[in-house]
Image (cartoon, helix red, strand yellow):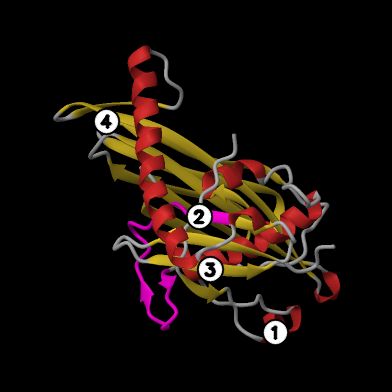
Amino acid sequence: MKRVYILVGMMILFSAFYTVKEHLKQPKALESITFFPIATNVAFKTASTSLNLTGQKILWRIHSTLDRQAYLRQDAGLLYSNGRLIGTLADWKQHTDSLSQTKAISALENALWQAITFHHAELHEKGEDIFSAQRMTQDQLYVIKQTSDSYIGFHTPKTAAQSRWKTNLDEQTRRMLQYSLNKGVRHYRIHLDEYDVYPLDVFSKRASNHFPGFNKEETAMFIGRLWEGLYKNYLLGIKKQDGTIIDPKGSTLPLILIAKDKTHLLVLTETAKGEPILLRQMIEGVD
């Protein structure tokens, strides 16, 4: 059964992506992801996100390899514990095919850990044409504290006790998000029947296929533009309506609302202090 989630708050319009002409004239910002048309003849040979427990540390790894050298390779990752952002990873390199990143985080409590990554490549062809290649990957890990200094971790429960922990942690995360959703719905009165709604982890799983009302090409296009906005307006800092930027750490797992009329999508989250945030992205080039 599809759960409908909604968080509401201040509306911030994603900045439009550069045109090819502007992109060629201006120096590239070191911290940015820019969407260009998808290169149909380019693919990732490997792309992975993994979470594993090592002692008292969560080891978070991101890796990807394109099938050719790219003008620019970028990987951007988000890590959540019980539905709240714990950390980010972002790296870029020019004239390479591969990227690898690793980060260790202390396991302090019983938690559902979720990591979501956007793998991106920018390819410059002859004639000044620019194309993109992209892929999303994810992993999740349940971590349970046994004693003051020992933990167990599992991706899939293997015992009845682990199954109970999984159920409890899933429900804890769901309740936390639902509390925020209810608050937002009362404030903004968004018409839920006008949207298909996906938490970012579910969105990531669906990204390899397509969404209702969109073909694969259209899906790839709005995924690329979505991550362009997420990177600039969320991962690098949540941009508020008054222009201030706040640390995204502690914010809730973004929820993606895709308009059934295919005109736009919304990204909804809530800051660590409980302030609702809404980002809006127009969907262009879809019939």
| Type of amino acid at the residue the image marks with label 4 | Gly
Disc 4 vs disc 2: which is toward the camera? 2
Q: Which mark is residue 191?
A: none
Q: Which mark is residue 55?
A: 4
Task: Report x, y in % for residue 81.
Answer: 35, 44
Instruction: Give the structural element (helix, strand or loop) at label 4.
Output: loop
Dot 3 alpha-carbon crowd within 10 angstroms: few under 14, some 14 to 19, many 20 or more: many
Q: Is residue 72 visible?
A: no
Q: Quadrant of residue 258?
A: bottom right
| Type of amino acid at the residue the image marks with label 1 | Glu
Q: Which residues are magenta?
A: 237-256
Task: Report x, y in % for residue 275.
Answer: 35, 66
Dot 2 alpha-carbon crowd within 10 angstroms: few under 14, some 14 to 19, many 20 or more: many
Mark 2 highlights which residue? 6
Mark 3 highlights which residue? 279
Q: CA distance from mark 2 to mark 1?
A: 36 Å
| Type of amino acid at the residue the image marks with label 3 | Leu
Locate residue 263 relative to residue 235 in the image: left or right: right
